[in-house]
Amino acid sequence: MMQMLKFNKWLPTSLNLRFAAASPLSALHHPFIHRYSSTTSSSSSSSSSSSSSSSSSSSSPINKYYSRNQLVDDIKTLRNDINKYNDLYYNKSETVISDFEYDMLFKKLETLEQLYESQYSGSTDLSASGSGSTTPINQVGAPIATAGNERGEKVKHIVRMLSLDNTYSKEDLMAFESRVLGNLSKSSSGISNNNNNNNLEFSCELKYDGIGLSIVYDSFGKLERIATRGDGDIGEIITTNALYYIPSLPKQISTSHLVNNNNNLTLGQNDKIEVRGEVVFKKSQLEKLNTWRSMNDEVEYKNTRNIVSGKLRSILDPKQEELDNPFGIEFDFISYQLFIHQNQNNQINNNQNNNNQNNNNTNTHNNNIILLEKIGFNIDRNAILVGSLSQRDSSRLEEFIKMWSGEKRESFDWDIDGIVVKVNSLEKQAILGQANRSPRWAVAYKFGARSMPTVVKSIQLQIGRSGKVTPVAEVEPVDIHGVTVSRATLNNLLFIQKLGVRTGSRVLVERAGDVIPKIIQSLDAKEPMTKKELLDMFDRCPTSATDGDSLKCPCALGSPLSQPDGYQDYYCFESNCPNQRLQSISWYVSKDGMNMTGIGPSQIKVLLEYGLIQDIGDLYSLADKKDQLLKLRGFSDKKVANMIESVEKSKKENLAHLFCALGIPGVGKASCKWLAERFTTIESLATASLQDIEVVGDLGPNISTNIYYYFHPTDQQSKDGIEKLLSIIQKHNVYDSQSQNRNQNRSDEKKNSSTTTLQQSSIFKDKNVVVTGKFKNMTREEIQDIVQHNFGGIIQSQIRKNTNYLLMGQDAGSSKITKAEQNGTTIITENEFDDLYKLIQK
């Protein structure tokens, strides 16, 4: 039992997790703690003198399970490790444990410190100088490191930047509401116009996973400084970097909005306006950036938060930045709090004028957020208001949590890790006040962990449909957000080499949505392994064992694997590789391919084993083999009928689906749709020259080359296979030719459009265009596609000095509009764009 409460540095036991997950006070009533308390209480009642002597002796055991020394040692160990994690996280942009694991350790420390205080109040065991003497319990963030941007210049925050208490259960949300109601009821100050608290309201906002910033303006709305959270009291000034990486930040705000929305507010010369929020980086931009860095053998960024933290606190060199990141790095700032500091006396003016309370537009947090958008800041437009966390509006909150903790979280372009729940009334916020490190009027409901530590049991190589080798690790089963994970991908062999991951390594595994879990970090922090060490982990080809490079394909043929020049990945180039065949046919029948819903990888594996199919084309002759199929174990009449029917139904899929099903390397769904609009039959694409594919397809030289050599392979066996496939596709009318004819007609109409139409549409030709807002008839992505491919425009994500046009839909961000007006960028409305698009369609 004693070992269960001992701190485990890497992976807490299930009891430790349950113990740590409870609130600090409830943990004091844990059965083990209760037993310990009863023991000491009993001994105390029997002999007060011996009890006193026992409690004063540091070496005397509390009981046979846990001694005082062990309690002190565990607290000091936890303090040291949490302080180390804080320094790595806040000052060095390094994440060595998951948020969930950190929260569990923090709550465990809170519990143990309260336990110690309840038994040894006034003792100096933990206060003496030395290792473990500094507790992070009341600390926000971490003390600022000396090295940083602008020589690490520090600034004291006008009002302390607090952290938030975290919870992972809905029961704790209900307990939070009860505490709020209880504290308001006990308040002697009273609440104007609302003494019974029946209309208590909460704002529920997305919790963005980024870096907190404080932005301060003078009383005229001019930017003074931008600073990090730091340790909550002292932040680091990063104004230069913030303006470089967050171009949407306003350098000047309109104070008239603040005055007009605050009755009786007069801004004095020394007054300050402060906006706080979170700096975030889009996941799509990180993926694009890492793809480029990987192709150029540059180290990839781990996650969006790390790149934000690293760039904001780095020594900025714009010229070097352009070389390192040619795509450009632009962050976003999501504001979440507004302060008006008057007379520099740290008082926050929430304009609580009892005589004009009903006319005050800023008496709620929600109205302040609306005001922030008016003065040019991005806000969380997904936030909702609820009247209760446990009663009348609880179902609405549950739906909100369910929606954002699932698919929407994965599809959302910014990283979020929970929901922030705040009391909406600013007056009630002021009454509730704050604890040591967090406000009593807000709490963060954290989504379940997406990454957890575990141990690698073994590593195997898998072969994809293109022959690409992907290493997959079998790991000790670990629960991640309610799903037991026992396998995780390792990207490629170079990734293994860089991380130094081996059998027995402790690693961090991440699971996001339906994507296969992946290993994102080695917790052993070993040096990268040599290439020989890497290759020695796997089977070698007997005929090539001396050259030190040839790994063996895990398939039955055991063919040698190769790493082409300029590639990070290894490949199997054996055309008869059974693993490739299984993967390519499985992809062909998948939802993104020909959507043969009655056939999956398990059925394909059986069909290959019994020789009923050899390749993709054989799928279309399954109806002729019905009798043979029915003899197979598990293939019932209904199952076989469904398989045959799904093959027939798949013939109604369009050409874009067929192109996608072929699995041509580098050609995704969007590119397949684009190809189908320009090559309206598979024959026209298969017989096109490389130059025609590159010019007409407009997909770049690399992808065009992949397409050409897919239909024109160099070895005879592959040539025969392609000819057979094309013949079968033509024979069985595999795709819906009518839809392609309609596409052809539209294409011909475009070619015959008048010179006037071309002149009208060419306003975007070679021009930089930003698309923002919501559109009635098309998605933003579809409009960007039209601007880029139909009109020849260049899409940008943010307004820059060289932006020519801002294409604006509904609910367009005010900051982009303001910046476009400042830069002289031409603004085009949705109706004006529709007129242009109609012309090109005529």
Image (cartoon, rainbow, N blue to C red):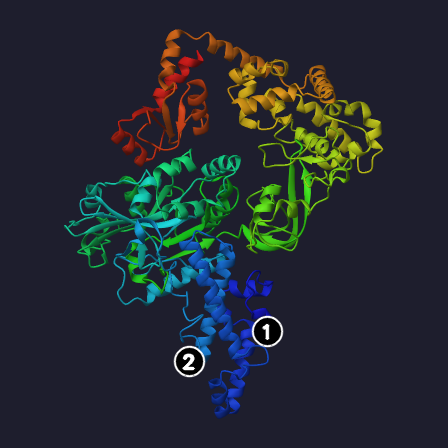
Q: How many marks?
A: 2
Q: Name the residue carrying label 1.
A: 2
**Residue 246: in sight, yes or no?**
no
Q: Residue at the spot x=51%, y=75% of the render? A: 71
State the image coordinates of residue 362 (x, y, percent, origin top left): 26, 49
Label ID, residue 385 = none
State the image coordinates of residue 600 (x, y, percent, origin top left): 70, 34
Q: Which quadrant holds residue 714?
A: top right
Q: Residues within 10 Å of mark 1 (few under 14, many from 20)?
A: few
Q: Is residue 327 placed above or below 689 in the rendered structure?
A: below
Residue in front for this viewpoint, 96 or 322: 322
**Residue 680: in sight, yes or no?**
yes
Element class at badge 1:
helix
Q: Is residue 592 placed above or below 36 in the rendered structure?
A: above
Label ID, residue 123 = 2
Q: Name which residue type carries label 1.
A: Met
Q: Which quadrant holds residue 682?
A: top right
Residue in front for this viewpoint, 69 or 382: 69
